[in-house]
Amino acid sequence: MPRSSLLPGLLLGLLLLPGIPPASAAETPPAAPATNAEFVGPPKPGPYAVALASLHDLVEARSEKRTELKALREELEHPQEDSDKAQITAAISETEAGIEDISRQIGALASGVAEQEFDLDANLKIDLKAEAEQLLQPFVIMLRSLTEQARQIENLRRELSVATNHRAVARRAIAQIDPLLAAAGDDERVKRELTRQRKTWKQRLDAVDDLIASTQRQLDARQANQVSTVDSANQFARSFLRERGLNLLYGVGVFFVTLLSLRFISRRLGAFRGARQARKNIATRAITLVWAVGSFVFALLAMLFTFNILNDWLLVGVTVIFIVALAWIGVRMLPSLIEQITLYLNLGAVQEGERIFFDGIPWQVRKLGFYCDLVNPALEGGEFSMPIRELIGLHSRPVTPNEPWFPTRKGDFVRLETGLAEILVQTPGLVEVRIEGGIRQTFTAAAFYEMAPENLSRGSRAEVVFGISYKHQAIATKEVRDKLRAFVREGLKEVLREDQIIRVDVELMSASESSIDYGVEVDMTPDAAVHYDTAEWLLTRLCVDACNHYGWEIPFPQLVVHRGADAATS
């Protein structure tokens, strides 16, 4: 009788059972075989009828085992053969083990206490291998049941392949014997031996043919009943959800309820509110970290306890395997985890509130946590969160006042190799500009930052170099300079407003071989950046107009040819 069917009686107070004879009387065998039972007749009805009926059945079973054991011992004294003695000895051992097991069941049912609970040495001994096997047994049984059909088909195919090879060997042997038998002639002794050999191989061939036919029929039947992989998976999923789906739902629900409840408590506690206000406090960060890890572990234990209460040993085993896998992964990732914890505590190379370079762009670390917030105020959409592990290997530094976060802003004008360009879009991913003529060009944000373009919207200067002839050397240092400056300033008003012109300057730069060169410069306000190219071209035109207006000669490059001495005398 299964032990589980006896457990309900343990809760009925069997210690007060009336009418149970003393143990010594129960162990004394009766004189006559007809009265070999320790209980005569079924128990009387009463409040303990179920327990007494179970005890009656167990005692009857033990009496039968003892009778069987007595008969086996008598048979062992007079065995017919030596092989019978070994079989009888094994049967005696098995019967004695059965009697001991029934006696333990009787004791547990009568007292409500298992022998293992009173065995102090047994409670102190733990066999890790046995415990692990017991834990994994339901999981292995489930996998075995899931793959039973495929494994049986594979075994049949392997048996069929081996039998086919054996058939080929038997046929080859018969084909070798038949010519020898035909050529044996009158040698009767050889013919008898060959005939015996052929008969042996023919029997083997027939047996193999029967085995192949039987195996092929089994294989065909298995394959006919085989379902597809998808159907098998669906069937397994339906069976799993039907048998354990509710338990799984309870366990997962307890996990999330526990985890979310602990997170809610952490948000409500004043210590954690203080942690959000003072993020650089190492103590509050450490408390937050310990609480988060402890909440997850406690939620896992709550789920495991739920499965244990529901007596679902399979889900308990799966949960334990999951926990062991997490622990193993944690050990493998321990160096990285230590670095992440150091960063989280604001003790690492990246500090909260400081400036870092990530993906070729500067960012400010606004918050350090399990997910860190990075922000760049100069970019559209310049704010995102990232796992703290992405910051490993980076370094931060304090932010200095008025330090730019990007070379440009939307709407600025910059000077590129292709010419003047207006910033249309700048995001953490790309920068789009419009070149003169409406052409649009796109750069990655990191590449654009690396280019370090000239931003004309912060103020700009257009300049040209212009030269006049040495004929005007007498007035070159002052008169020409002053008149050219006034003329250029007045002429720039064609494209610039007066308030957009900060300064116009003309200075003598150098006296070259064929001309006296002046540097002509104009400094413009940021809102004049759109006219930068036009102003630069206009400067050259205004210098030419000034020469025409004042009668100054513009020299051209001269080539001086020096004749050699021999050529001069010839």
Image (spheres, rainbow, N blue to C red):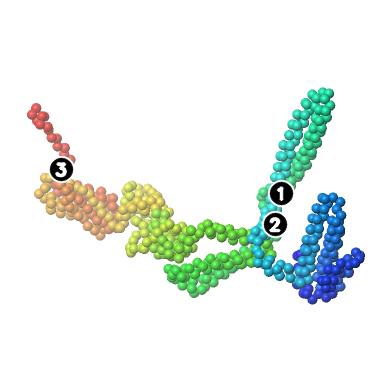
* Residue 184 found in image quarter: top right
Say the numbered circle drawn on residue 239: 2
Badge 2 marks a residue whose secondary structure is helix
Q: In this rendering, which labeled residue sits more in front, label 2 or label 1? A: 1
Amino acid at circle 1: Gln
Query: The disc labelled 3 sits on which kind of residue?
Result: Ser
Name the residue rendered at 86%, 67% in the picture. Answer: 29
Instruction: Give coordinates of residue 534: x percent, y percent.
Output: 27, 50
Please rate how many residues cluster around mark 1, counting C-alpha atoms within 10 Å: few if below 14, some from 14 to 19, many from 20.
some
The alpha-carbon separation of the residues under discs 3 and 2 comes to 101 Å
Kind of residue at disc 2: Ser
Relative depth, front residue between 264 and 191: 191
Numbered label tally: 3
Residue 94: x and y, percent?
Answer: 79, 58
- Foreground mark, 3 or 1? 1
Q: Quadrant of the N terminus?
A: bottom right
Q: Residue at x 40, y 50 (%)?
A: 442
Q: Which residue is mark 3?
A: 514
Report the Cα–Cα distance between label 2 and label 1. Answer: 16 Å
The secondary structure type at the circle numbered 3 is loop
What quarter of the picture does the C terminus occupy? top left
